[in-house]
Amino acid sequence: MEVSRRLKSIPPYIFAEIDKKRQAAVARGVDVINLGIGDPDEPTPKHIVDAMKAALDNPVNHHYPPFGGMKEYKQAAAEYVQERFNVKVDPDTEVTSLIGSKEGLHNTIMAFIDQGDINLIPDPAYPVYKTSTILAGGEPYFMPLTPENNFLPDLDAIPESVCKKAKLLLINYPNNPTAGIADLAFFEKAVAFAKKHDILLCHDLSYPEMTFDGYIAPSILQIPGAKDVTIELHTLSKSFNMTGWRIGFAIGNAQAIKALASIKSNVDTDIFKAIQIAAIAGFKGGREHIDHCNKLYVERRDLAIKRFKELGWDIQPSKATFYMWLPVPKGMTSAEFCTEMLDKAGIVVPPGTAYGPGGEGFFRVSLCTNVERLNEAFDRMVKHAITFDMGKARV
C-alpha cells in the first residue's frame, strides 16, 4: 500500500511526535511536566456546560446542523464581534462556522491556493500554515519574525516577484508561538499591502481575550476598508476554554466567506447543534471566566519570568497569550535543549523549529500549568543545572 505524494510531502505533525515522546517517558515511569501544549487547564465555564446539557436533552438538536452554522449561532457571533471590536458583519453573508480555527485555516488555504501559488506565512508560525499550503500544491514563502522587528513581518522586504505569485497572506496576532502583538498601524499596512497586490489577507485571531497589563487586542477588521480583502478566523478554544469542543467562526469579505463555506460543505457536515448552542451561551455569558483565567496566566507568567531570570535568561513580560518564546543556551540547538529538558528533568517543551526554520535557537513554554507544577519544573531545572549558560562548554 502506497500513500499519496501529498502525504509524503509533509512531515509528521510535530505535536503528535512530541506527545509520543511524552507518552514514552510516562511509560518509563517519569513524572512528566508538560509545558508544551496550549490547552487551558481551567475547565470550560459552567454556564456553557449547562447550556450543552440542556441542548442534549432536546431531540431537535440531534439532527444534521445547517451548513455554515445555525442562524442563531452566526447572529451571536456577529453580536460578539460588534460588542468586542465595534466591527459590524452581516451574519448571513459575512460569517460562517468553523470546527475550530485549525480546520478553518486549512480550508481557507485549500479554497485559495492552487498548484504553484505562493502563500506568505510568518516564520515561526503555527505548523498548519506551512503543511496545508504544501497539501494544496502551493509554496510557502517565509516572512521572518524576530525579536529585532518585534515579531512583525517586514512586508516591504518581500520581493516583487514573490508578490506577483502570492494569493494569500497569513498573519496571527496576538502571536503563537512568539507572544508578539500588533497594533492598528501594522494592520493598516497589511491591508494596504493586500490591496496593492490583490491578495487575500487571512488573520488568525485565536487569542483576542488573553491579554494583560492594559493591552487590548484589536481585530484587523477595525481598519477601514479591511473587509475588501480580509477574512478573520476566530475560535472559542482559548478564550472560552473550549479546546476539545472544536468550534469557531470566520468573518470578513463575503466572497472569501462564501469560498470557505463552499469548501467546508464538501468536506464536513458542520458542528453538532448542541455545541453551537453552548457556544452561544459563551458569547452571552460575560467576561468573569476570562478575567479569572487572565489573572492566573499573569501570576504564572510573572513566576516564570522570576525563575527563568534566576537561571540566567533575560526575558521581558509578554502582553498576550499564555506562551513564552525563549532563546536556548548558546552552543545548543533547539532540539538538543528540548531533549535535555525531557531526558534530564522530565519537562516537555517544543523546540522552536517545530514552528518553522526561523524558530531555530528558541523554545516555547506554555503557561497552562498551575504554579505548584511550574515551581516543580523550575526546581528540576535547578537540580539538573539546566541554565542559560549550560551550553557554553560546547561553544
Image (cartoon, helix red, strand yellow):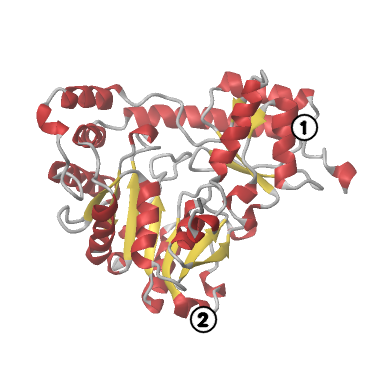
Q: What residue is rendered at 75% in x and 33% in y? A: 311
The image quarter containing residue 144 is bottom right
- Give x and y (percent) for residue 221: 31, 59
Determine the secondary structure under disc 1: loop
Q: Position of residue 173 (x, y in %)?
A: 45, 52
Q: Quadrant of residue 35?
A: top right
Residue marked by disc 1: 386
Q: Tell me the distance, in whole angstroms, between the alpha carbons under discs 1 and 2.
A: 45 Å
Residue at 41 percent across and 67 percent down: it is 168
Q: Nearer the viewer, residue 359 or 221?
A: 359
Amino acid at the residue labelled 2: Glu
Residue position for label 2: 160
121 left or right of 225?
right
In this orientation, does residue 43 appear? yes
Query: As drawn, is 363 to the left or to the right of 10?
Result: right
Are there few (<14), some (14-19), or many (20+) residues within 10 Å of tag 1? many
Q: What is the secondary structure assignment of the residue under circle 2? A: helix
Above or below, 361 against 253 in this view is: above
Q: In this view, does 94 lie to the left or right of 186?
A: left
Q: Where is residue 318 in the image (x, y as percent from the top left)?
A: 55, 43
- Measuring 17% from the left and 58% from the top, which residue is drawn there? 93
In the rendered image, the vertical position of residue 166 relative to residue 50, given as above or below: below
